[in-house]
Image: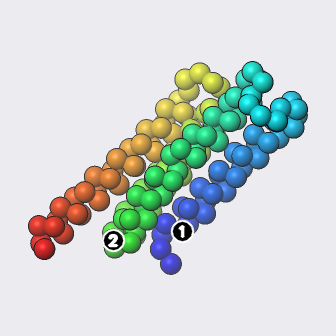
Amino acid sequence: MRVTGLYAALCAVLVVFLALRVVQQRLRKRVGVGDAGDPELIRRIRAHGNAVENVPTALLLLLLLDLGNTASAVVHAFGLAVLVGRLAHAWGLSRSSGPSPARLIGSVLTWGAMLGMAGLLLWQFAGRAAGA
């Protein structure tokens, strides 16, 4: 089994958890569509939305590294960075709509991992293209 499956499953649990938090607040405030200006609902929607916006690209990059026979330790390091980044970001945004250390750390970890994976894939591609 590929390493990506572990991080895909853990990220899926996170996304569903964040979605359930949105539903919980919608039921509490009786809001069917939109956010009704409720600050808590707005934060929950954005925490979920931000995960949905970032996780698919990160997992795609992770899978491509995994399928390209990148060392498992490297794939785990990137997967862990993405997962911890998404957890930190969601936690920080759930607590405050303003700037927070957790959101900053979450963004840096996620985007850093994505850029690192993209760079590694480009490097691997260039190496394979040169050897062809």
Q: Quadrant of residue 39?
A: top right
Residue 40, given in percent of the width and then of the height, sits at 74, 28
| Way the structure is coloured | rainbow
Q: CA distance from mark 2 to mark 1?
A: 15 Å
Q: Secondary structure at mark 2?
A: loop
Depicted 118 relative to depicted 92: above or below: below
Residue 16, given in percent of the width and then of the height, sits at 70, 52
The residue to which callout 2 is attached is 68
Q: Residue at x 63, y 34 (%)?
A: 46
Q: Quadrant of residue 33?
A: top right
Amino acid marked by disc 1: Gly
Amino acid marked by disc 2: Gly
Residue 37, given in percent of the width and then of the height, sits at 75, 21
| Residue 102 visible, this angle | yes
Of residues 30 and 88, which is closer to you in this image?
30
Q: Relative to residue 95, is residue 2 drawn left or right? A: left
The residue to which callout 1 is attached is 5
State the quadrant of the C terminus: bottom left
